[in-house]
Image: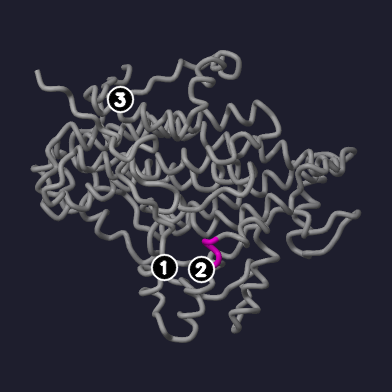
Amino acid sequence: MADQQHQLPRQYHEAVVHWQRHNFPDYPRLAEQWDTYFPKDEAFCLCARIQQQMPEQIEVGERAGQPKAIIPKELDPKAAEELLAIIRAQASTEFGSIQQHNGTLARAQHDEDRYWVMRVMAEELRHGYQMFHLLLSQDWSQASGGVDGKQMVEEILSMGTGSHVLDAFNLEYDSFIDNICFAAVIDRVGKYQLTMQKVCAYRPMADSMPPMLREEAFHLAAGVIPLRRWAKRAAEGDPFVTMQAIQKSFNKWFPRGLEMFGDERGGDKNLRFGFKDMKNREAQDLYLEEVRRMLRDINLRYLRARASQGTPEQAEQMLQELEQSHGKIDGIAYEDLLRLPDAHFFRRKGESAWSMIGVNGERFDDVDVYLRYLGTQLADGYMASRDLMLYADTLRKVVSGELTADEAGKKMPRLKRVGGHCPCSKSVRWVVEEPAT
């Protein structure tokens, strides 16, 4: 059965379109070229999609077996507040991702890569639209402290890079390599979050997940497939893309991706409320193994291109030997391959927050030595960013005892913009009221 499609009330639909014109101006070009790059796929629709025939009973948690809630008032008050926070955070990530991608979209070397990312951006726009549908189709006032739907939409549309809910969406891209690595690393976290929420005890949320997941699969492909092509080009000596450049971008995003699962010791509340079917550490461990497999696949493609006369079996054997010896075989060094950083590397949240740990798990005692080390593991453009300056200042306070790790995570400044207005006029808001009749 086809998904049900819903459109927001006109003033909110137009607010999203208005936002798109300012934050994703290339959107019309995607529609013009859709059949060129995606001839087998249905044309894009800016609408909310609701999956039909989903389970009607709660699948996990304290109320497993009972009917799923259809309106917020049917949820426990604390559960409603928690779910509202999840929906608002999800909406923030969708719009935040578009803003990040847009900054370096024009830097793509090839049109195909650019249009693939543009499709990702359009589908992220639809996902944010989907979250607005959840916020606006029911009354959340009891869970929101009286904040109405219009105010919630205004707040989310007013966020810019630096003021979104999750840290991964507050970092500027340094180059188009970030567009691709972000899709491969961060969108993969999104896949896990959406999959876990398919069981959500609030039925409208659960019913929203399958259509989003189908689109999320393309987002992962928009990261992995270019990485495979780039690895092959790097192996062939292409001067415009290197495994080292990919690795540095990967090192930037991987710690933020791990943090998107929440503290490794948490997740009980979402499981108890029936919103997700895994705790944080369990989901994070599965994610780690999946990322490890992805990197291994890319490395094999690199090795096959470097040793073009060899067989796939010989490439597999070479990779195993390099992984074990960390040495060099036939002129190919272990350092030439992509490597999964230690899960504690460069973390700001979780068990290892503000620990000075390297990509191989090595520990540092001196802040300046660690910061110089980060300069060898992260792209120059990122090292010169304000985010790294703020990180360095906060790290010094943690090491000196001025802040605890928990306080540092809460107090680290954001690059917050003043929000609430359309960029073209300080007197116009995103949501325009309907004229009185």
Circle 3 — which element?
A: helix
Q: Which residue is mark 1?
A: 412
Q: Which residue is mark 3?
A: 14
State which quarter of the image contains the N terminus: top left
Describe residue 379's horizontal placement relative to residue 345 as left or right. Answer: right
**Residue type, label 3:** Glu
Single out the mark in the foreground, 3 or 2. 3
Q: Going 38% across and 29% down the picture, which residue do you hit?
A: 126
Q: Which residue is mark 2?
A: 391
**Residue type, label 1:** Met
Circle 1 — which element?
A: loop
CA separation, marks 3 and 1?
A: 35 Å
Q: How is the image coloured?
A: one colour
What is the span of residues highlighted in magenta in the rendered image?
386-390
Where is residue 207? Give x, y as percent.
27, 32
State which quarter of the image contains the C terminus: top left
- Quadrant in the rendering for residue 88: top left
CA separation, marks 1 and 2?
A: 8 Å
Q: Camera-side residue: 61 or 120?
A: 120
Q: How many labels were placed on the picture?
A: 3
Most common SS among magenta residues: helix
